[in-house]
Image (tube, helix red, strand yellow):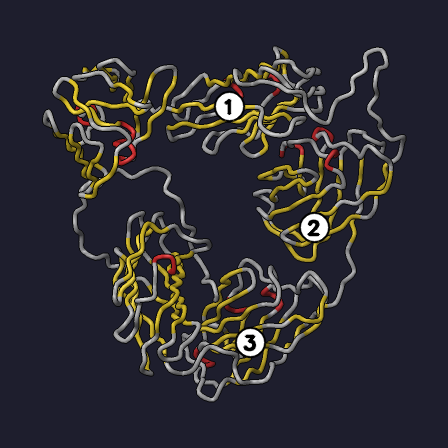
Amino acid sequence: MHKSAKKGLAALMAATVLTAPLAMSPMSAYALSVDDVSADDTDTGEKTDYKIEFEIDEALKRGDEITVTFPSGYSLKKVSESDVTLRDKSKISLDKVKVGSRDITITVDEKISSRTTLTLEIENVTNPSSKGDYTIKVKTDRERYDDKDITIGKGSSSKGSSKDFDVSQSSYEEGATTSITLGKIELSKSDKLKKGEYIYVDFPDRDMLPKKIDDSDVKVNGSKADDVRITNSDSIRIKVPKGADKDNYIKLEFSSSAEIRNPSSAGSKYLYKVSYNDRKYESKTFEVKGGKKKAFDVRLSDKGVGARTSYSFDISLNERVYANTPVTVEFPRSEMVPPILSNLYVKVNGSEVMSLGVSGSKVYFHTPSGFGNSSKLNIEFEYDAFLRNPSTPGSYEIVVTADGRKYYSESFSISGAPIINPTNPTNPMTPSATPVPTDNNTATLTLTKTAPQAVTGMQVAIRSLGAPLVRNRDFIEIVMPVGFRVPAYIAPQAVTVNGVSAAFVGARGQNLIIVPSQDIPARSGVNINLVETAGIATPATGGVYSIGVYSSEEPGLLFARTVNVVPNNSVTFQASIGSFMKNGKKIALPAAPFAVNGHTLMPAPFFRDGLGVSTTFTNATAKIVGNGKTIQFKVGSNVATVNGKSVTLPVAVQARNNVPVVPLRFVLDQLQYKISYNNGSYAVFK
């Protein structure tokens, strides 16, 4: 099935939305547009899969509904919730799916931007038993119905009856940009092109297509296409123009300015597939021939074995690239590349690269924001990037991938005696492949600031290393959770390791890499201090976050510790104390919270006075209303009701001083509040 072209990107909601009473409002004047309705099988009475492509004009919010209505004659009895999928450029999260006799209503679980083209895929729909044209409708909470017809009873969507159609290209060399002519494709006798309908083309290899094709670069039967959209990496959708209306054939022409390129690998079994009106047509196979690889020279400031050196090279590309184009440089040995790199020392055409990362022997980045466009790349790794030559002499090559195309260097030579790690007979050290046993159960990790979006310092105390760390080479890696801000560059002076400034500090994605400037033996403790000027910041959302600590010389995790990020407006309390703090004020409780079998019980007034949630209670019952939930408790019972449904509680409700005391975590989960613990104090917050 073809994936629809998309205009928007669905974004995950960053925070839980507070529930409030909803007021009915008139339907918006915006109108969605149904672009296409297709089925895998259009025979009468067949159970088949449907695909509905439509564009929304008004953004959808989490909790909004999309409804598709099938006409009389269709059966949805075989459709289950798992048979319904909504996609943009990726699968969109759904809260729920309701299947009726003729309607399917889905509730989206994330925001969808306006002007987004969506694809709704529904499996196991049963076609009507009578032939004819049927109208399928789509609407949202924010836009009125639009519809599209589909014809049932014209036969299944099997391959068309015409012979394989011809393919003509301006080039058959692998990776080359080419113009393409497909057809003439003789349509089945009952078919004719209709203005506004869609032709689909599946290309023979992934990534042949550019990011966008202009309508002017594609002709249908000699007329400029009305609309051309790339629906995935190897398929496009073309709207039939007026000039091709009522033709009984298809001839498609793609100009070289569309920047379609041949597959990157030679072969003789390539073919195109064209679909129209639920019929499929295949081209004759054609051959893609191998082309001569364009090699580039590698320049080094030092060609000695193991030497620290700069690297630079000029690459002539097969096509132009633009700003923010992904580039990968693969060096022959992982030992050549430091665990992290700063983009300050990697440049393309004289400007610093963006989004730089390292994985083994590969360096990933994007071309600079002010790059413009060019078919030539000058890539430079400066001396301060800390690249080193291989530790053994020989001939080596570098592979560069730019916008999905690979380019290979000429061989370059590294000379000199191999580097052998020395040993000292008077003080031998024979490191084992297996680290010595250590115990980091008492290791600690703390933050100096715990408020959201606060610039914070960090102290890490590793109790014992299982393997030694060699100065200026080995490193400690601190894995920071998503949400923390980690600067791309941190001055070594902002971090100390056992009281001495680090040799090097940097970031690998969310992770901190800290290279010590002194040797640290096995079984030694390591104290790392990052001052606040390092620029690390806590997440914007309060919660409990886990931070892991690793060593480059040991497999697996050394230890992990949780830290709490607590909003300033949180409500705090302590176990066994009959009060809580809110907005700096101390508010009394009728009884102190206490624990039963590890579950904290909280007096009912806490939810009213502390969280501002509607709460009523007697000496035997309690009722809490919030987040669309009505929760009712009875003293002495371990069963509560949520919106009328019985739910088993972790412990029974009790009474203290004639006030119900209910399981705290259960209520907070229902109300979508968070709770954290730090140094004997609990904090509750949204």
Residue 595 appears left or right of 617: right
Which is nearer the N-term, disc 2 or disc 3?
A: 3
Q: Position of residue 339 (x, y in %)?
A: 66, 31
Which element carries disc 1, helix, strand or loop?
Answer: loop
Residue density around tag 2, few if under 14, some if 14–19, many if 20 or more, within 10 Å = some
Name the residue rendered at 22%, 32% in the picture: 638
Q: Which mark is residue 252?
A: 3
Q: Position of residue 194 (x, y in %)?
A: 42, 80
Cβ–Cβ under 8 Å for marks 2 and 1: no
Q: CA distance from mark 1 to mark 3?
A: 56 Å
**Which three-letter amino acid code belongs to the residue tagged 3?**
Leu
Which is nearer the N-term, disc 2 or disc 1?
A: 2
Which is nearer the N-term, disc 1 or disc 3?
A: 3
Which sits in the foreground, 466 or 495? 466
Q: Nearer the viewer, mark 2 or mark 1?
A: 1
Which element carries disc 3, helix, strand or loop?
Answer: strand
Residue density around tag 1, few if under 14, some if 14–19, many if 20 or more, within 10 Å = many
Name the residue rendered at 35%, 15% in the picture: 680
Q: Quadrant of the C terminus?
A: top left
Cβ–Cβ under 8 Å for marks 1 and 3: no
Give the residue furthest to the left: 618
Residue 100: quarter of image: bottom left
- Vertical order, 367 against 162 (above or below): above
Which element carries disc 2, helix, strand or loop?
Answer: strand
Q: Position of residue 491 (x, y in %)?
A: 60, 21
Residue identified by numbered label 2:
376
Residue identified by numbered label 1:
535
Residue 471 appears left or right of 281: right
